[in-house]
Image (spheres, rainbow, N blue to C red):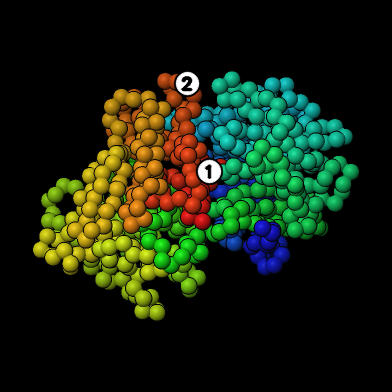
Amino acid sequence: MSWVTSGENSHGYVQPAPNGQTLAVPAVATHRGELWCLWSDPSKDLYYAVGNNNTFGQRTQFPDQGVPVMAELLGMLHALVVRDSGDIAHYIFDDANQVWSATTLLDTAAGFSTGGTPALVAFHNKLFLVFIQNTTLYYSLWTLNPHNDTAVWSMPQEMGGISQVRGIPAMFVLNGTLHVLCSSNDENREILGFAYSSPEDVWNSCDDVSEGKSAAGISATSYGDSAFLAFQENGPDDTSHVIYIAEYKDGKWLPQEAVAGQTSADPPQLAILNGRINCIFNSNTETKDLRWYSRSLLNYSLSSWMKDIPDDTLLSNMTIPGTHDSCAESNIPFVRTQYLSITKQMEAGIRFLDLRCRVHSNGHLYMYHGGIPINLPMYLKLDKVMHDIFTFLSKDGNPTDTVLISINNDDVSGQDPPSLFYNAVKQHIENTPPYSTGEPRWITSRTTVTLGDARGKAVLLRRYHSDPSLAISERIGIDLSGWLNDNPEFTLRTPDGVTLTLQDKWQYSDIMPLADLIKSKFNFVSNMLGKAAMGPPEQWFLNFSSAVGDPVEKGEIAESRWIAVGAHSEIIGKFVPGMNHNVRRNYAWEFKTRYGVIAMDYPELPKDSDLIAWLIGMNM
């Protein structure tokens, strides 16, 4: 697919002139479903802007000056700024208050100082910082303690005697291995590659992950099975400053390609958001405006992936990525299960949402998780959640996709009759106005419908009990009220003849190493994937990859984040990959196969993962 301009007008400006001018390398990252750019203007003031794959918002001033780099680690966006003095300042973005935290100055006496642009990446729940000092590569790790979220920077270390390098280094993760690339400090200026060995804490030469030549520096990123390298020129004698991109896939580098013939003053920077690779650079012109080109890495759009699936496809006969406790973005660790908002989940391709609600005294439904309100102290209404969903589904005027909405009553006290919650949801649905075409926004059929019937609509999966006074023919939604909590496999047959097989083993209360917990959960998920692949198309399969330890004091059991993304084991002394990695890498997938609904925690993580797109691809 070809490179096209994004952003302001056909020239691809990140900001309207002159707001996007920069004399240095910009920093680019993705954070909670958005694209971020941080740059220094000609006066050396720093600005940042936030956007999507199409446009950035207005710039906002950053509280420092210098050359920036950014990376996201476990839902937190980090920025390091190299000041003119060579000092390195560390900032973390406070999402709740939308401000950058007070600075932490890295210790210059310990060796944290550089005259160039460093590289920063998240790997195994750590931040890796690489910088050049006097033609020698150094690295340091910012390690997060999973028990109390405290972290410190390690003392800078030489990369095993790797010396005589120059320019701007780059880092990326590919197939579970961290790589660093840099340019040789000789007349050839070849790009050198090194791979990190976690157990030994050493870097080894890795000649198969390097490509091309670069006079100034490089940047790199990865997505699924591919790594991408961006660099200027084709060697030290080439002064054209043409931007090239090379892709590493299936053990080899594919032929490098020019980015629409564009040139840059400094090395271009890469970031991938929702299956689209973004290349941002300062133009090789007098004004040095930030320019922006991108191209899709997929043959479908994650935001409208159902578009080309036939209308007569049963919703039960699809592979559908979803989220568990979809609204739980809470800043309370044991409540949180997601970093992406509902809209960002939809943009990423999620099409099954697990909503937990309670009825308040005013009759309205509010979002909860385990008795804790979402978005305290403001609360979050079901009205707001569904408004965002319908806005997304109808955004292009010709709806292509649907979303499965599983609603459950979070209040398990049994103090209120089932009719109270049932009628509150029913009233909410009845109060939802139709589209301007007269089409309803909800499908409350008790039986399975086709995709053609459901496009643009929300399909109700009713996990709560009905009003017992209603006849079966009067009830709404596919009836999941017989759901067996914390069960590795069970099958429901609704009064209307719909068969659903589910896996929802989520609670681990025994003393157990994290590795054993994840192995156990992966076996349950794999078993259900296999059954879905072999089952009849009219039978539903709902498969939850989420889990949590309870109580958290036992063994290595922790919050859902560590089970989904992975964590360092104190028992076996190494990093244990989480469920998202295992589901993507360790199951024997077959393309064009139905695997049912897979509900996940933090499905966009780890950062190099293409898990959502991988699941969607099973339908194509």
Residue located 30% across and 46% down the image: 502
> Splitting the image into 4 quarters, where does residue 384 fall?
bottom left
Residue located 52% across and 29% down the image: 143
Inspect this view and state whether residue 327 appears: no
Q: Is residue 53 rendered to the left or right of residue 83?
A: left
- The local crowd at label 1, few if under 14, some if 14 to 19, many if 20 or more residues have their Cα within 10 Å, is many
Whole-Å distance between the Cαs marked 2 and 1? 24 Å
Total numbered labels placed on residues in the image: 2
* 521, above or below 12, in the image: above
Inspect this view and state whether residue 52 appears: yes
Q: Nearer the viewer, residue 45 or 364?
A: 364
Q: Nearer the viewer, residue 406 or 201?
A: 406
Q: Is residue 504 rendered to the left or right of residue 183?
A: left
| Labels 2 & 1 near each other (Cβ < 8 A) | no
Residue located 82% across and 45% down the image: 234
> Splitting the image into 4 quarters, where does residue 489 fall?
top left
Residue 271 coordinates in the image, percent (x, y): 62, 49
Residue 139 coordinates in the image, percent (x, y): 64, 28
Of callouts 2 and 1, which one flags the residue occurring earlier in the amino acid sequence?
2
Residue 608 coordinates in the image, percent (x, y): 56, 42
* 474, above or below 164, in the image: below
User: Residue flagged by tag 2: what amino acid is it?
Assistant: Gly
Q: Which mark is residue 573?
A: 2
Helix, strand or loop at disc 2? loop
Which residue matches tag 1?
Answer: 609
Name the quadrant of the N terminus. bottom right
Q: Is residue 188 rendered to the left or right of residue 8?
A: right
Helix, strand or loop at disc 1? loop
User: Residue flagged by tag 1: what amino acid is it?
Assistant: Ser
Residue located 65% across and 48% down the image: 270
Which residue in the rendered view is the most extreme toward the right? Answer: 237
